[in-house]
Image (cartoon, grey):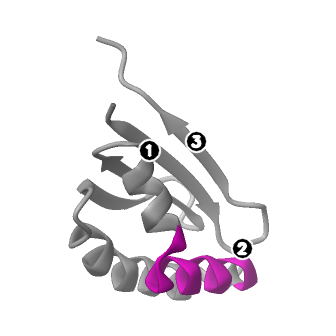
Amino acid sequence: MEQYVFVRLHARQGEEGAVEEALREVMGPSREEAGCLSFHAFRSMRDPRLFFIHSQWADADAFQKHAELPHTVRFLERMDALLDQPRDVTRTEMIE
């Protein structure tokens, strides 16, 4: 079953540029993964420190593999130093 993942990231004051750069760097490798159906990053228009990732995965195994890949692990470690709030990750399924 396909999974849709929403991630909320809130940058520390002054780290907005670093968060955006890290997002740009992780998008390409993530999109190339076999189980990735889509991967997009967004920035809030009202709060420039607030970012979101929306991704779609073929199934739970594809997302789990993504979470363990070196580019994802590096991204998450980098985010931990750039955020002022814990990242919020929500795995969902579509209601049809």
Distance of mark 2 from mark 3, alpha carbons? Answer: 17 Å
Residue at image point 71% right, 73% down: 83
Q: What amino acid type is highlighted by mark number 2?
A: Leu
Q: Quadrant of residue 79?
A: bottom right
96 magenta-colored = no
Highlighted range, magenta: 68-81
Read off the residue under disc 2: 83
Residue 60 tag number:
1
Residue projecting furthest to the top: 96
Q: Quadrant of the C terminus?
A: top left
Residue designated by label 3: 90
Label 2 near label 1: C-beta < 8 Å? Answer: no
Horizontal side of 45 relative to 1 (left or right) equals right
Whether residue 69 is visible here, answered yes or no, is yes
Count of numbered labels shown in the rendering: 3
Residue 14 locus on image (x, y percent): 66, 86
Main SS of the magenta part reads helix
- Look at 42% across and 76% down and name the residue there: 23
Question: Mark 1: which amino acid?
Answer: Ala
